[in-house]
Amino acid sequence: MSGTVLVTGGAGYIGAHACKALARAGYQPVAYDNLSRGHREFVRWGPLVEGDIADRALAAEALARHRPVAVMHFAAYIAAGESVSDPALYFRNNVIGSLTLFEALLHAGGPPLVFSSSAAVYGFPDTMPIVETAMQHPVNPYGETKRMVERALHWLDQAHGLRHVALRYFNAAGADPEREIGEAHEPESHLIPLVLDAIAGRRSGVDIYGTDYSTPDGTAIRDYIHVQDLAEAHVRALDYLLAGGASAALNLGTGVGHSVREVINVAARVTGRNVPYREAPRRAGDPPILVADSSRAQSVLRWRPALPALETMVASAWHWQERLAGP
Ligand SMILES: NC(=O)c1ccc[n+]([C@@H]2O[C@H](COP(=O)([O-])OP(=O)(O)OC[C@H]3O[C@@H](n4cnc5c(N)ncnc54)[C@H](O)[C@@H]3O)[C@@H](O)[C@H]2O)c1
């Protein structure tokens, strides 16, 4: 397939990996990012439109100039803890920003859209592994914003035919093996980069929140998915929509859960170093286990994780972080 794809949040962690995958697949990515939490140097596979998704005039101008065949919408704030302390920031940026973008898209003819949703829409799920039809009870404003945007997309499709795929990712991890791009959030809230920062001495240690869960080693279990696999799933979702596929919501994970202690042990093994850690009480709103059933994505998108091993994800993240220490 070919054509221009507008990638909001294209200067961020997952958006930049998607731009690289799009370029590899023959598309021309155009990143659209206000750089509030992104990195100009991550925009390597096409131009950057520097601006906010809530700037309707700028979005309209970018759509008129680049005439994308489709849009990938990653732009959002992503820290669940921050969303609890500042909900308005999250509803304004993630919900109002998205709606403004969608209005501009409809005005430009309504190109199909791949939306970055999240496992956070489920909250504390009642079944495990989680299927897409599980009850959705987000337990923080971040998850609520993702759910609201998914609902808005549903009704925009009903009213105006805005076809979309909402990809509910579990925990994105790892980095580009060529180490051109990687995970660099500020503030960082994700376990693997925090562990690697602790190993490298960039922070004093990593906190294990909760050691008394009813899991085999007492720590919380998450489903980690390699960012390259996520990027590839986005390209598949785009191909699916461009071939006329109907709107869908799909989980993306490997289906295998890893505990916090396992992540720490794998990081120690991969790097050959000690991981300084502290045991801390549970955090409110942290479910004990989140593992995806991704069989629907596997059949709809004909996609399968190619790099499912936690070791591979941790090693690529370490390789990326090590670039800071030299060539
Ligand atoms: N990282 C994960 O594990 C994970 C898991 C589930 C879902 N997601 C979703 O994936 C998407 C990308 O996450 P990420 O980890 O790459 O985050 P990121 O912070 O690295 O990237 C987000 C990008 O969006 C940009 N942005 C934010 N608000 C904007 C606005 N109003 N206008 C224009 N640009 C704006 C930021 O500058 C940044 O470059 C987000 O929607 C996130 O909610 C991420």
Image (cartoon, grey):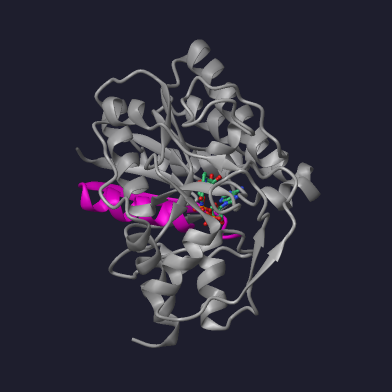
Verify whether residue 32 appears in magenta: yes
Give the magenta part as a residue range: 12-37
**Extreme residue in the top direction:** 159
Verify whether residue 20 appears in magenta: yes
**Extreme residue in the bottom direction:** 326
Q: What residue is at 68 percent from the left and 65 percent from the top?
A: 279
Q: Is residue 12 above or below residue 66?
A: below
Question: Whole-percent x and y of residue 45?
Answer: 32, 59
Q: In this view, does 93 lie to the left or right of 182?
A: right
Q: Is residue 11 visible?
A: no
Disc tally is 0
Q: Is residue 244 above or below residue 175?
A: above
Quadrant of the rendering where the N terminus is positioned: top left
In the image shown, does 9 or 233 lie closer to the viewer? 233
Q: What residue is at 70 percent from the left and 36 percent from the top?
A: 139
Question: Whole-percent x and y of residue 130?
Answer: 49, 30
Quadrant of the rendering where the C terminus is positioned: bottom left
Q: Is residue 193 above or below residue 222?
A: below
Q: In this view, does 216 lie to the left or right of 114?
A: right
Question: Whole-percent x and y of residue 68?
Answer: 35, 38
Q: What residue is at 54 percent from the left and 57 percent from the top?
A: 260
Q: Can residue 243 be seen in this view?
A: yes
Question: Whole-percent x and y of residue 96?
Answer: 67, 35
Q: Is residue 272 left or right of residue 261?
A: left
In the image shown, does 187 or 74 lie closer to the viewer? 187
Q: What residue is at 47 percent from the left and 59 percent from the top?
A: 262
Using the rendered view, name the quadrant where residue 211 is placed.
bottom right
Using the rendered view, name the quadrant where residue 313 is placed.
bottom left
